[in-house]
Amino acid sequence: MDTPMDRILMRRDFRTSQRILLTSFSLLLSSFTPLLHGVELRVDGSQRLGTIRPLHGVNNGPLNQGGTIDLSEYYRQAGFPMARLHDSEWPDPDIVDIHAIFPNMTADPEKADSYDFSRTDDYISAIVNTGTGIVYRLGESIEHTGKKYRVNPPADMDKWARVCVGIIRHYNDGWAGGFRHNIRYWEIWNEPENRPAMWTGTDEQYFRLYGTAARAIKAAFPDLKVGGPSIGYPGDMEGDTLKATDFLKAFLKTCKDQQAPLDLFSWHTYSYEPFIYAKKAREIRKLLNEYGFEKTEIHLNEWNFLPENNWRPMSLAGQGFERRRWYDIMGGPEGAAFLACVLSDLQDSPVDVGNYYSGETSSFGLFDRFAVPKKTYYAMRAFRMLLDTPNRVRAQGWGSEQGTILAGSNTDGSQWTVLISYHRSREAELKLTIAGLPKAAYHWQFSLLDAQNNLEPVRTGELAEDGVIADRLNGPCVIVVRLQR
């Protein structure tokens, strides 16, 4: 007889059977996870590959918001090699730009009292005091306003060039109560093809301004490096080939035909794809060589993560929650993993100087408006840790473009550092094998940068005889493994 109790027991048995089946199925799936999402990376300490290059420069300096914020100690800890001065905010636009330093274009560029260096002196001195070098952009900051105030072609380009020479004399030769900062790199204007936000003139007007200023600077300071055009859009990649823009080709042709100095070629890219930068750099190297600029340095001096490859949140239509989410992604774990991937991948590129945009408290910056470091700042710190062990060794294993690995040792082989960047938003089983080290016992420390951690040590241990360290990646994330003999 089917009693109520019998039916209760039957339902309970059925639910028990369901739980057993589901648990078994879950265990079966979990057993396949390492196979489906396994990452096997290998470091071979016996194979040397040169030196890890400090390409983790930034834009702008540590003084922000009228001097109410000073990031100097953070700059020292990250060891930024270069700070490019563009859209400098202390507060913008009272420093660095030509109009801020030389406010009256009818004045005499040969007279010291025609210049107002005071605020820019303080800003640059703060950068120099952190040990960071400078790339000085001569020109004006971007203007997103409907009316353009400063980004117009100078009426007198010869005088404008003489003003540039006066600025260099002040910061390198001590002129007008100045300094001897030995600033090597001087860049002429920014993104002149970005009209009208950065330039209201024609291509030919910019080419004339560039040639006039570059010749004047090199005539006065032959040992300095001058260049440009700080191009915002060098062209699209079709496979591994760069389809250079007409502006870029015309600029290089004009420099060649008119023998205008081009010690450095500067360019920008914002992307969702971390491996596009090295590809573009190799193509730019080939293009420079074709035009006879084999010795010209390559400066990637504006770059950052472009969430979802979408510029809409920067527009008026994207303001509000959409824009905040966009910047949160840029400065969060995904942006941090992207940053570390780019810096690692650039090691095998012809880029000579790199400058992330930007190093301060702007929306694109490494810090929020209250000077709190974002995840991206800790990615810079992770890369900086590599430079304590700068002798690069072979590291490989990514089967696809999921991430990067970079490794190095100190001179006597007593310390080793491995930087792992994983920019996929999923979990994976990690098997890291470290081989080829001098025979000794090694202690390792595993530091993690992800949504919950800011590069804190999360695991330690002694390196096993097989050299294997196993863990689980929960991407996007950045990992630093440090070994000490």
Image (cartoon, grey):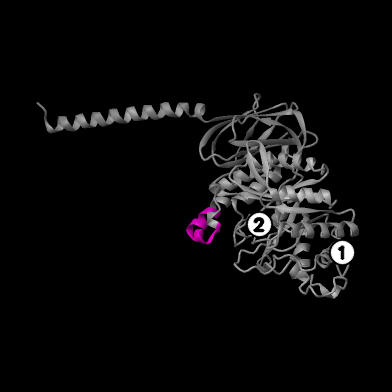
Callout 1 crowding tier (Cα within 10 Å): few <14, some 14–19, many ≥20: some
Q: Which span is picked out in magenta?
A: 314-327
Q: Which residue is mark 1?
A: 169
Residue type of the residue flagged with mark 1:
Arg
- Mark whose residue sits in front, 1 or 2: 2
In depth, the one of 85 and 90 nearer the eye is 85
The alpha-carbon separation of the residues under discs 1 and 2 comes to: 30 Å
Q: Is residue 379 left or right of residue 228?
A: left
With respect to residue 43, does 100 lie above or below? below
* Magenta region includes residue 81: no
Residue at image point 28% right, 30% down: 16
Q: Position of residue 369 (x, y in %)?
A: 60, 62
Residue at image point 82% right, 57% down: 211
Q: Is residue 428 visible?
A: yes
Q: Position of residue 390 (x, y in %)?
A: 76, 39
With respect to residue 52, does 314 lie above or below? below
In depth, the one of 168 and 210 nearer the eye is 210
Q: Secondary structure at mark 2?
A: loop
Q: Quadrant of residue 13?
A: top left
Q: Which residue is mark 2?
A: 194
Q: Which SS does the magenta portion mostly show?
A: helix
Q: Position of residue 345 (x, y in %)?
A: 68, 39
Residue type of the residue flagged with mark 2:
Asn
With respect to residue 396, does 248 lie above or below? below
Q: Position of residue 316 (x, y in %)?
A: 52, 62
Q: In the rendered structure, are the residues bearing label 1 and label 2 in contact, judged by CB atoms less than 8 Å apart?
A: no
Q: Secondary structure at mark 1?
A: helix
In depth, the one of 82 and 39 nearer the eye is 82
* Magenta region includes residue 322: yes
Q: Quadrant of the N terminus?
A: top left
